[in-house]
Image (tube, helix red, strand yellow):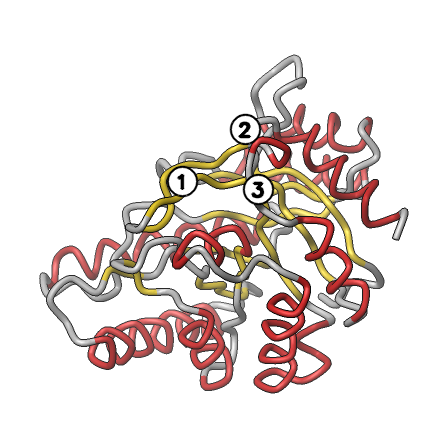
Amino acid sequence: MLSAKLIFGTAGVPRSTKASNSTAGIARVRELSLDCMELEFVQGVRMSEKGAGNVLEKARKENVVLSVHAPYYINLNSPEEEKLKASMERIYQAARIGSLCGAESIVLHAAFYQKSSKQAAYENVSKALKELTGQLRDEGIPAVLRPETMGKPTQFGTLEEVLALSEETEGVMPCLDFSHMHAREGKENSYPEFMAILSKVEDALGKEGLANMHMHVSGIEYDRNGEKRHLTLKESDFNYPELLKALKEFEVRGRVICESPILEEDALLLRKTYMEL
């Protein structure tokens, strides 16, 4: 689904929501004048089909765009067949229940390199995603799997890796976590660097790729081993005004999901900063 503009929202139910369930979160997102929310299935897909139907109804009523973050316990490069199958099943269930909620984008942490070469890890992830997207197509599940750019050098998920996967497999698109890209090596934190990233997206996926972006943003603490933890935007060194300037320059559309510890406050800060550019 192509977005007519760039929209902003929260990774999960806003903290100021009176109840902690997804339908209450959707209502709160709308009250805050945000436009999207990511359903956090990170500890497992625990929503029933009936629950998903209620979420779909609420999201349509409030005109809030939903996406899903698949469980953390995924490694598509696992040498153990059982762990690989369990990882694929978790992604499948996140896509199946997510689609019943009306969510098309399914974000996932694809893999760890472990003892593999980067090329071998890439081939394993690519094979698994091809199998999964084929299964989703066969079952008529309208989901786009979005491997995320990751914040530690031990994790599969460089910009080049997620773009290559997106180029070669229908039904795969990137989730660009700009904070992770910054934390990975302490770079990627200036207007020229953000422009270079978006140029790579356009080179790989064309204007359509820029019109259907899924992005994560927050403050981030990191060291030489990469990401340590998320921070609020203002207590981190992440240069979010320059990122938003680059997004506007490239006329990027899609969604920006805020993963800050103060979810809605920082999502609103991002939206306000963007609108004022």
- Pointers 1 and 3 in contact (C-beta within 8 Å): no
- Pointers 2 and 3 in contact (C-beta within 8 Å): yes
Q: Secondary structure at mark 3?
A: loop
Query: What's the CA distance linking mark 1 and mark 2?
Result: 16 Å
Instruction: Name the front one of labels 1 and 3.
Output: 3
Could you say which quadrant of the image residue 108 lies in? bottom left
Q: Nearer the viewer, residue 137 or 245?
A: 245
Residue at label 3? Answer: 218
Residue 2, percent from left and from top: 75, 68
Q: Secondary structure at mark 1?
A: loop
Residue at the far right: name it.
276
Question: Does residue 83 appear to the left or right of 28 in the view shown?
Answer: left
Q: Amino acid at mark 2?
A: Pro
Q: How many numbered marks, from 0 up?
A: 3
Q: Amino acid at mark 3?
A: Ser
Point out which mark residue 261 bears. Answer: 2
Up the image or down, 249 lies above or below 244; here it is below
Query: What's the CA distance linking mark 1 and mark 3?
Result: 17 Å
Instruction: Name the front one of labels 1 and 2.
Output: 2
Q: Earlier in the sequence, mark 1 or mark 2?
A: 1
Question: Does residue 242 appear to the left or right of 124 in the view shown?
Answer: right
Q: Residues within 10 Å of mark 1 (few under 14, many from 20)?
A: some
Q: Amino acid at mark 1?
A: Val
Point out which mark residue 42 bears. Answer: 1
